[in-house]
């Protein structure tokens, strides 16, 4: 819990987030962007500057009066560790406070096959090795951000459940990593963290309703309304990958039947193709190549995936009425013709899915899961460091 009063704590968090979205901002700009009074901005920015977490970055051009000072996050103040858990691998990285990756690595660890205690010990060991090599003083590490392909209680860092991995149910991931590393740890669901990153980096509209749809190893979504992620009562909001699209479909490891991700995710597309032919393809790239070469089964599998994604997108429109839909999908991005075909089918589907109803954007190939882990660490852990420093300064009358 913060030692600062909650209002001041929230003001600091708001201004730090604003500086991430708009580096080199002046106090008047920050006041305009956040809606905070100029006097509040002045006091908080002064304290953050004294703490060393932000710094002056130049002087703005004069508009007739006194030239205003610009401010930015002090990128050299410390480092953050980011961890992106995926179904069959985990990606680790060390970042400076600007979000620049200093080093990263990928470990072949399956959270479905490996128990959580063993898995967490492996991850903690890898983090310790990275810090020993790349960070001379561990005290410079502000903490660790972790994204998980499952439901998480973000307040406690407990993994609530992960489809197909019953041993992870109610697992205290944050506590385990904190005990092993001696660092602060924040944990969140991967798609929630990704939408935080998109907001954090200024890639989405503010104060509106945005839906993020991620189609990769699995399928998930996140909804941000007026700058806040909608989590639902049990942190299950956005589990669209386990929505039934075929009542006569194949069983899913979640216990349901005919789930969306069984037909449209990377793993689902590969398994659908391999189940119909005497092949053992291992990537969507191979399935797409087969489709381009005229393979009838590959074309059928991809067409089916497009059809289900059209239905899913239509459901998103009618459920959330967003003004922005951001899609991450490597195989759609690699074959833009499929994406445009999906849009054409969507626009023709009903009166609720007209072309100008929602701004739809397809992201590039870069995965945002690791950057999502950085964003939640920046947002949650950096402000706690501010809390500690300012509390210390007050005690020492500095």
Image (spheres, rainbow, N blue to C red):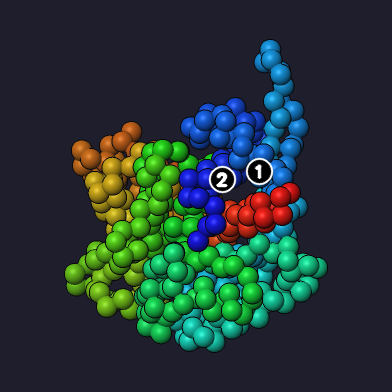
The numbered disc on residue 190 is none
263 vs 211: above or below: below
Structural distance between the alpha carbons of marks 2 and 1: 9 Å
Q: Quadrant of residue 349?
A: top left
Left-right relation of 338 to 374: left
- Residue corresponding to mark 2: 12
How far across and how far down the image is residue 44, in percent? 60, 40
One can see residue 198 in this view: no
One can see residue 5 in this view: yes
242 vs 278: above or below: above
Residue appearing at x 66%, y 43% in the figure:
47
Give the mark nearest the N terminus, 2 or 1. Answer: 2
Q: Quadrant of residue 322?
A: top left
How far across and how far down the image is residue 170, in percent? 39, 78
Toward the viewer: 349 or 231? 231
Residue appearing at x 59%, y 67% in the figure:
184
Toward the viewer: 34 or 224? 34
Residue count near mark 1 (Cα–Cα under 10 Å), binned few <14, some 14–19, many ≥20: some
In front: label 2 or label 1: 1
285 vs 199: above or below: below
How far across and how far down the image is residue 239, in percent? 33, 63
- Residue corresponding to mark 1: 47
Residue extending farthest to the top is 64
Residue extending farthest to the right is 136
> Do the CB atoms of the residues marked 2 and 1 lie less than 8 Å apart?
yes
Residue appearing at x 66%, y 81% in the figure:
125
How far across and how far down the image is residue 394, in percent? 66, 51
Left-right relation of 125 to 239: right
Disc 2 secondary structure class:
helix
Residue appearing at x 69%, y 64% in the figure:
141
């Amino acid at each position: 819990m913060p030692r600062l009063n909650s209002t001041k704590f929230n003001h600091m968090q708001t201004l730090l987030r604003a500086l991430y979205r708009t580096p080199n901002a002046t106090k008047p700009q920050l006041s305009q962007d956040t809606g905070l009074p100029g006097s509040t901005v002045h006091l908080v920015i002064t304290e953050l500057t004294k703490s060393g977490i932000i710094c002056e970055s130049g002087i703005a051009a004069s508009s007739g009066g006194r030239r205003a000072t610009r401010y930015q996050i002090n990128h050299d103040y410390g480092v953050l560790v980011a961890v992106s858990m995926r179904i069959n691998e985990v990606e680790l990285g060390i970042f400076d406070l600007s979000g620049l990756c200093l080093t990263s690595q990928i470990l072949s660890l399956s959270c479905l096959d490996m128990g959580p205690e063993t898995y967490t010990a492996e991850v903690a060991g890898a983090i310790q090795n990275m810090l020993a090599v790349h960070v001379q003083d561990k005290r410079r590490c502000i903490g660790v951000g972790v994204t998980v392909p499952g439901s998480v209680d973000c307040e406690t860092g407990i993994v609530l459940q992960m489809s197909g991995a019953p041993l992870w149910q109610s697992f205290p991931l944050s506590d385990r990593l904190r005990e092993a590393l001696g660092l602060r740890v924040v944990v969140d669901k991967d798609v929630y963290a990704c939408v935080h990153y998109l907001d954090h980096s200024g890639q989405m509209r503010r104060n509106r309703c945005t839906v993020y749809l991620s189609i990769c190893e699995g399928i998930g979504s996140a909804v941000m309304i007026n700058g806040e992620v909608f989590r639902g009562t049990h942190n299950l909001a956005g589990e669209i990958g386990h929505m039934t699209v075929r009542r006569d479909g194949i069983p899913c490891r979640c216990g349901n039947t005919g789930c969306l991700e069984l037909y449209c995710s990377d793993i689902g597309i590969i398994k659908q193709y391999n189940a119909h032919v005497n092949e053992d393809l291992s990537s969507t790239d191979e399935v797409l190549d087969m489709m381009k070469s005229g393979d009838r089964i590959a074309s059928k599998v991809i067409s089916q995936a497009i059809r289900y994604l059209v239905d899913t997108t239509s459901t998103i429109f009618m459920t959330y009425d967003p003004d922005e839909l951001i899609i991450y999908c490597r195989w759609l991005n690699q074959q833009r013709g499929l994406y445009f075909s999906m849009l054409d089918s969507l626009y023709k589907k009903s009166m609720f899915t007209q072309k100008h109803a929602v701004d739809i954007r397809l992201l590039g190939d870069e995965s945002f899961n690791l950057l999502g882990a950085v964003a939640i660490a920046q947002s949650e852990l950096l402000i706690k460091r501010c809390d500690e420093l300012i509390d210390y300064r007050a005690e020492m009358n500095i």
